[in-house]
Image (cartoon, rainbow, N blue to C red):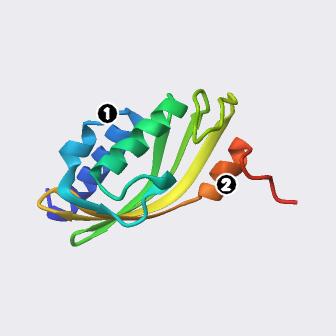
Amino acid sequence: MSATESNKAVVRDLIDGLFTKGDLGAVDTYLAEDFINHDPPFGVTPDRDGMRAAGAHLRAGFPDWHSELHQLVAEGDIVVERFTASGTHRGDVMGVPPTGTTVSLAGINIFRLRDGRVVERWGRLDELGFFRQLGVVPDRP
């Protein structure tokens, strides 16, 4: 397997393990000790503990959370992921009590890998759309 394909497999396994399966140990397996999250979601810290907290928070609020991979593009040590994740709101999320609504979150992540582990992440998530679906932010007029 080429280095590029290997890097794509690491990203795929990280996302599947942490977010779809809810395996918080995926953080230790796939993220380097010096991991930096340049765009941490939902106010978590920009390190491995923050990624673990993001995974735990999503699974607590959405026990059936699932990330659907649309595209993985890799070049050198960079892997870009385009996805849509979704789940049913069954637990408290950022102070919002369960609604039973199925919500989705679209996004793009860029990962940099070194020696088979993720060392950096940049991402853009449709957090506004996510919060609108939860009723935190009103729908567009």
Q: Identify which residue is drawn at 26% across, 40% down.
A: 26
Q: Is residue 77 above or below residue 83?
A: below
Q: Is residue 94 left or right of residue 48?
A: right
Residue 115 on image: x %, y %: 11, 60
Between the C-alphas of marks 2 and 1, the distance is 26 Å
Q: Is residue 59 above or below residue 33?
A: above
Q: Which quadrant of the rendered structure holds the N terminus?
A: bottom left
Q: Identify which residue is drawn at 88% across, 60% down.
A: 141
Instruction: Indicate the amino acid at tag 2.
Output: Gly
Q: Identify which residue is drawn at 56% across, 54% down.
A: 106
In this view, which residue lies farthest toward the left?
Answer: 115
Regarding residue 19, the answer to whether it shows in the image is no
- Which residue is labeled 2 in the image? 129
Q: Is residue 124 above or below residue 102?
A: below
Q: Is residue 139 above or below residue 27?
A: below
> Tag 1 or tag 2, which sits nearer the N-term?
1
Q: Nearer the viewer, residue 25 or 78?
A: 25
Regarding residue 7, the answer to whether it shows in the image is yes
Q: Quadrant of residue 109?
A: bottom left
- Which residue is labeled 1 in the image? 23
Q: Quadrant of residue 21?
A: top left
Residue 68 on image: x %, y %: 48, 45
